[in-house]
Amino acid sequence: MLKAIWYERRGRAEEALAFGHLPPSCNRPPGEVRVRLHASAVNPADANRRAGRMHGALEFPRIIRNSDGAGLIDRHGSGVDPKILGSRVWLHFGQRGRRLGTVA
């Protein structure tokens, strides 16, 4: 299980955010990697999206928040060179168009 912060509805942080444990996402789509995060940061777009100031309705039933982070690549999908496993990376807009952000 992994620790995560998510929301399932729009609103103020203290009203919308939840914290708990979720099953890890093990499989990666083609061309994507999973990053074992060492740091996560709030991008202004994250707060605006959660507050309902961007994108209208929720794009997914549950959104793990935050788009920016840093860590090590620990899994990869097809089409990704396996030599990158263990590489240190920094990412931004990681949650854009996805339900999984960097605060997990």
Image (cartoon, grey):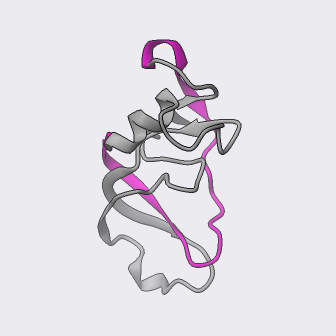
- Does residue 20 lie above or below 96 as drawn? above
Tell me residue 79's x, y (percent): 59, 86
**Residue 60 left/right relative to 18:** right
Tell me where the magenta segment starts and ends, as one range. Answer: 13-42
Q: How many marks?
A: 0
Extreme-top residue of the structure: 15
| Quadrant holding the N terminus | top right
- For this rendering, which residue is in front, 35 or 97? 97
Tell me residue 64's x, y (percent): 53, 39
Q: Residue at x 57, y 25 (%)?
A: 10
Tell me residue 48's x, y (percent): 42, 35
- For this rendering, which residue is in front, 67 or 40? 67
Residue 30 inside the magenta-drawn segment: yes
Residue 52 inside the magenta-drawn segment: no
**Residue 83 left/right relative to 71:** right
Answer with the quarter of the image where residue 36 lies.
Answer: bottom left
Q: Residue at x 42, y 74 (%)?
A: 85
**Residue 39 left/right relative to 56:** left
- Does residue 36 lie above or below 33 as drawn? above
Q: Residue at x 62, y 25 (%)?
A: 9
Q: Residue at x 50, y 40 (%)?
A: 54
Is there any visible trace of residue 1 in the rendered image?
A: no
- Does residue 7 lie above or below 32 as drawn? above
Is there any visible trace of residue 16 in the rendered image?
A: yes
- For this rendering, which residue is in front, 31 or 42? 42
Answer with the quarter of the image where residue 28 lies.
Answer: bottom right
